[in-house]
Every structure is written in C-alpha cells, then in structure tokens.
Amino acid sequence: LYLGRVLRQQGIRQGEPFIAVHPWSSNPLKRWPGERYRTLMRLIAERLSTRIVVIGGPEEARATHALLPEVVGVVNLVGRLTLRQLAALLQCARVLISNDSGPVHLAAAVGTPTLALFGSTTAATSPKRWGPWGAGHRVIWRPSMEAIAVEEVFTALQDLVQRLR
C-alpha cells in the first residue's frame, strides 16, 4: 500500500517499467564511482526513456543528492523503504543495477534480473562466490571498480533489457 502510493506520487503508474539503481556498498572498495552512476542514469533516462528508482538505506540519504543526475525520470527512494517494501519494489523493477551488495541478492530472490558490478582480483570476493543466484543475471567483473566503464555497463543493460522482451 505504502509503496504503491509512493510510486504514484513520483509519477510511476502501476505496471510501468522502471530500472532500480543501488549505487552503494558498505565496503568502499566495492563501490563503482558515483560520477559513473550519475552518467549511467543520465544515459538510461535519455536513451532508453525508462524511469529510474534509486534505492539505498538511511545511511546513504545524505550522499544521494550529489549522485542524482539532473534529468527527468529519476526517483529518489533512498532511506524511505523498509526491507519488505524494498523487496516489493525490486519485484516490480525490470532490472536492478548495483554494486556487490545485499539488494543484488534480494532482487535475485524475488526473481528480478540484476546487473551486478564486481571489482576484485581475489576469489574470496568474486562473483563466482558472491554473485546473484539463478538465471537471467548479468555480472561485470573487472580487477577494480575503476576498470568498469560506463558504456560497458550501459551496453550490458541494453542487452539484458532486450533479452527480457
């Protein structure tokens, strides 16, 4: 009920496709640079004409404003959802784009395809061990998060969205 009301207040109609973006991680080494997320969200809004819902916990709320691109179609729900509401939101999302973090696993658990970004050279933190479970997900894995380019992520997103049609 709350989630539906919040999405309607943000101009997202029931059943309207959107992409969820979670640009956070408790481990700074697992974070893709914020300016790249900002550029990626701008590309999604402009080239895919798809709404974007940015998610995260209350601890990220203060950092969100600097991260959001100044484009139409980006909804900020950072710090506004309970875990149950987040699961419901992810179930409605077309795709989740995220660093290696909890929402990747929550999205996989509710059947939402993920595009997960990993930057590591060690097996202990690799997507082979910590990547999303199940089929239909896409993982970009490079030696560091800085080695992942915006165009690479955008191309992977386009491919994932095409497969979902």
Image (tube, rainbow, N blue to C red):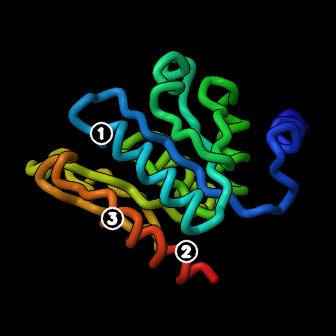
8 shown above or below 131: above
| Residue 128 in the image, given as x and y percentages of width and height | 24, 60
Q: Which amino acid does label 1 sit on?
A: Pro
CB within 8 Å, label 3 to label 1: no
Report which quarter residue 111 is drawn in: bottom right
Q: How crowded is mark 3: few (under 14 residues within 10 Å), some or many (20 or more)?
A: few
Q: Mark 3 points at which residue?
A: 151
Give the residue at x 58% y 68%: 48
Q: Which amino acid does label 2 sit on?
A: Val
Give the residue at x 26% y 51%: 118
Whole-angstrom CA distance, mark 3 to mark 1, is 14 Å
Q: In which quarter of the image is the C terminus?
A: bottom right
Q: In which quarter of the image is the N terminus?
A: top right
* Mark toward the start of the polypeptide (3 vs 1): 1
CB within 8 Å, label 1 to label 2: no
| Image-based side of 51 in relation to 66, left or right | right
Q: Name the residue under label 2.
A: 161
Q: Which amino acid does label 3 sit on?
A: Glu
* Mark toward the start of the polypeptide (3 vs 2): 3
111 shown above or below 9: below
Q: How crowded is mark 2: few (under 14 residues within 10 Å), some or many (20 or more)?
A: some
Q: Name the residue under label 1.
A: 33
7 shown above or below 148: above
Give the residue at x 51% y 26%: 64
| Image-based side of 37 in relation to 42, left or right | left
| Residue 15 in the image, given as x and y percentages of width and height | 83, 62
Circle 1 — which element? loop
* Mark toward the start of the polypeptide (1 vs 2): 1
Query: Can you tell which of label 1 and label 2 is closer to the viewer?
Result: 1
Please tell me the numbered disc located at residue 159: none
Report which quarter residue 23 is drawn in: top left
Circle 2 — which element? helix
